[in-house]
Amino acid sequence: MLLCVPNEILAHIFSIIECEDVEGGWDTKSSYSALLSLSRVCKRFRVIAEFYLYRNIFLLEDDADEKWLQFARGLQRDPKRGLTTRKFCSQRYDPMAPPNFLRFLTKYFLKFSLSPDRDRIPPGLRSLRVLLLLLMPDLRHLELTITDLKSTPFLLNGTFESDEDYGCYGFETNEESPSYKGIPNIFFFRHLESVTLRSYDDNLGSPIRGRTFSGILNHPCVKALRLDGFAVWHCTCMRLNWGKAPSNLTRLDLDNCILQPMSLKRILEKCRSLTHLNMALTGFGDVKDPTHNFEDFGIVLREHGRNLVELSITKPMWDPHIADPFNFIGPLKELTVLKHLSIGRLNFVGPIDDDTKKDITIHNALPQSLETLTIEAEVAGCHVPLTRVERAGLAIGASVMSFFDPYRHDLIAATGEATATPYFIYRLRDAMLADPTGRRILRARPRISSKTLSLEALRALPENSVGRAYVGWLDREGVSPDTRATVRYIDDEECAYVMQRYRECHDFYHALTGLPIVREGEVALKAFEFANTLLPMTGLSIFAAATMKRSERQRFASIYLPWALKNGARSKEVINVFWEERLEDDVSDLRKELGIEQPPDMRDIRKREREEKKRLKELREQGL
């Protein structure tokens, strides 16, 4: 039936099958397979289908060598096909597949060197130039996955690494083309508009070599460059062959990249026509080390980024709660033509103006030209989504194991997260939203750690202040505020912060009540938290009293459990206390404000009981 359809309609159908996405690339591997199958129906279909097949060349590096050879011979026999090519994309779907690109080309050139056509396409570097450059002179979009150190650097710059360990059989240097010497191969793509380079290294942040993309920034027609998964170090930018010709690059996307402020400075100095900058930065893979100094980035942007129309600084892959909370971009009002800004919540403009030492307002920090402002939620990089069955299994397993081993803080944290959703953590979040101070906390999202609170400064506060009581309790118990685990099993981003805030405020509750970190004190505080927050994990922790000694259980049941339930139920929501603002307040006044009575000193009671037991033992030994 399709054989009777006019060529114009067939071309339209094939263009739909082509499935181009917004960036002009292939959407799925099945699109290519469908067009390839249609091209085998008849000669008429083959002519129409091959137009789209060669317009967007999509090759997988794990494809069979015969497929690559068929493609290469097709271009050689019909050069007009190469003239229709607008995008060349070399990808691989299986990250563990061996990179066959270089191995295939070696075989291909060796076969041609033994064929009757060997005079037409000699082996060596010139063959690759003929195959990938001269046959596709009108290429518009180039997308490469860098899986080796040889083929891609040559394609872009005509150079291989000089290390002997990276020698390339079949790619000997060809000195018969002196006119090409010193000219980056990418310049032969005269109509090239965009370049995408992706790294398939298992570890994000693979160092990109200067030879790999030094010619891209100088290409007169390339307007857009995207690097995915690389580390752009300052030393790399210093070694680039910048040349004297100005760059016409207008858009730069750095996805999952490591970038240094001085690297950004060199790029902005070279690419003065750059108007769109997207920095989706990452840390060192599994090592949660926030290497990016956003304060220095802000200085560079204010000095060299005044031509930017769109700026995006998002997606920190490290745990953002470990990052320095004072590491902000700073005011961006100097970017007078900036219209669109997208930035992470934790890397926003900052709370204090360095010049005036006053609080920064959004109106004063952003340029008047700004049209859209997007505050991106921070990505912790460790969230684990769970089904209902998985969540129930985690809650049961972690709670049982933590009952027998109460010092497994990771199990206690997992129990708290698994049992808090989907109801109880939302109730706590709503309690914060209903309180003015709670709403301010949710907007600011402060973190409590040794980086955000100067423990030395707290030790210098008056004796009866909240900060002095807090640091005194830390010193007395020998604990640190940096030991709180990151929330992993709560899906809602705002609720995850509420749970994180509850954990980090736990030591303040200890300091306010004076309860120690011994098992008896922890269970008493958990009972207080249950009456105040209604989190199920805190209620389940009360059952840990069964593992105490008999005397401890009696004391807990007669003194601390009644105290905890009474004070927790009648006091204000302690989650709504902005502890960072109350450090200099009198701790006794804060207890009265919240409606909390301080319980009897547990350590003194335990000390008196030990001394009494010791005295009775001595009397028994003396026969009295």
Image: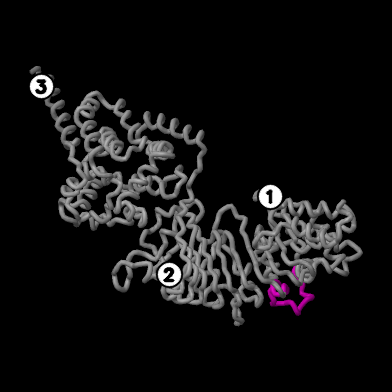
User: Which residues lie in the magenta part?
Assistant: 172-189
Q: Looking at the picture, tell me which residue is in the foreground, 457 or 247.
A: 247
| Upstream in sequence: badge 1 or badge 3 | 1
Q: Is residue 86 above or below residue 560?
A: below
Residue matched to label 2: 298
Can you give x and y, in whole percent of width and height, for residue 172 in the image? 75, 67
Q: Tell me, yes or no, whether the highlighted magenta stretch contains residue 184.
A: yes
Can you give x and y, in whole percent of width and height, for residue 208 in the image? 58, 64
Residue matched to label 1: 97
Alpha carbon distance from label 2 to label 3: 73 Å
Predominant SS along the magenta part: loop
Q: Amino acid at mark 1?
A: Ala
Q: Residue at x 70, y 53 (%)?
A: 28
Can you give x and y, in whole percent of width and height, for residue 422 in the image? 44, 39
Check disc 2 and report its element: helix, strand or loop: helix
Q: Is residue 442 above or below residue 428?
A: below
Q: Tell me, yes or no, whether the highlighted magenta stretch contains residue 9.
A: no
Residue matched to label 3: 619
On the question of residue 125 being in view, the answer is no
